Amino acid sequence: MTVTRPLLTVHQLVAMQKEGRPLVIADCRAGSADDLEAGRRAYVAGHIPGAVYFHLEEDLSGSEREHGGRHPLPDPEVVAAKLGAAGIGPGVTVVAYDETGPFAARCWWLLRWLGHDDVVVLDGGIKAWVAAGFSLTTEMPAPTPQPFVARPRTKMVASMEEVLHRSPEQVVVDARSAARFAGAPDPLDAKQGHVPGAVNRFWGDNLNPDGTWKSPAELAARFAGLPGPERLIHHCGSGVTACANLLAMAAAGLEHGRLYVGSWSDWCSWDENPVEK
């Protein structure tokens, strides 16, 4: 079965399951800053049959430090061991899902950063699965461990220094809401505003009201006028929702540039970095 990357419909997923293709379904639901365990509780209460769980803080991110942002990249060897234990390895397709889009997109980006390209995001997430009439389960999976070798692609990542000293031809795309971009009060970060010269493309505008992703043409229109990937850097609050913009551009058939993983939470941790409102 041919799958249109990087998004997969519920019925395509069911067809893949019937074909018996090597497949790992990854539940990436996450909570909020006030309740980091909400995603795990939701998974325990009911998930797509066979799905393993990846925690945003524990599995898809590294440890927070003074600099580097709230969701820095995990150690490649540490996360490789977790992915292998979850049954991910050569020839295995990973289908990531959540409820709203950005956490599954972070998983999609992370796996590709580690060298595993056979990964897609379930269009519409768990809500689309339930809406299509398919059931959830509380049964925990028992995956067969696979060898996962991490091969980080350093060119997918942009550093704070590269953002700070970028050329006039390079464009920073901020995925946060228009209010946060403009400098509205925000308890998540010590400073409000945006990287000087950045443009705003709110990640949530990639989605339809039902949580599915907009058409390739609609997504392409959202990012029209941006430069080529070698001059494009994406960021957000902490390197998560920016992945939704990267995914949207990929779904539109566009080359999408690099991710500044530390994003605003890293940028504003450096006192000398300029802020624009």
Image (spheres, grey):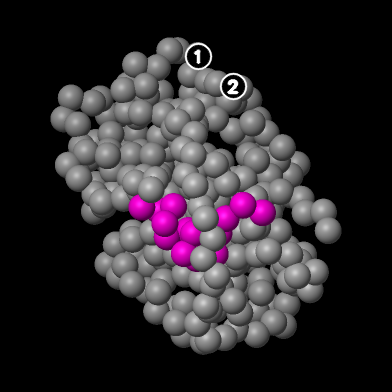
Per the rendered image, the range of residues in magenta is 78-91
Q: Name the image quarter holding residue 95.
A: bottom right
Label number found at residue 169: 1
Q: Residue 235 location, x and y as percent? A: 42, 37
The residue that appears at 42% across and 57% down in the rendered structure is 81
Characterize the local packing of mark 1: few (<14), some (14-19) or many (20 or more) Cα atoms within 10 angstroms. Answer: few
State yes or no: residue 80 in magenta: yes
- Position of residue 264 in the picture relative to residue 107 (left or right): left
| Residue 217, picture quadrant | top right
Identify residue for label 2.
227
Q: Is residue 261 visible?
A: yes
Residue 30 part of the magenta-drawn span: no
Q: Amino acid at mark 1?
A: Glu
Q: Residues within 10 Å of mark 2 (few under 14, many from 20)?
A: some
Q: Mark 1 falls on what kind of element?
A: loop
State how far apart marks 1 and 2 are (Cα): 8 Å
Quarter containing the C terminus: top left
Determine the residue positioned at 68% across, 45% down: 251
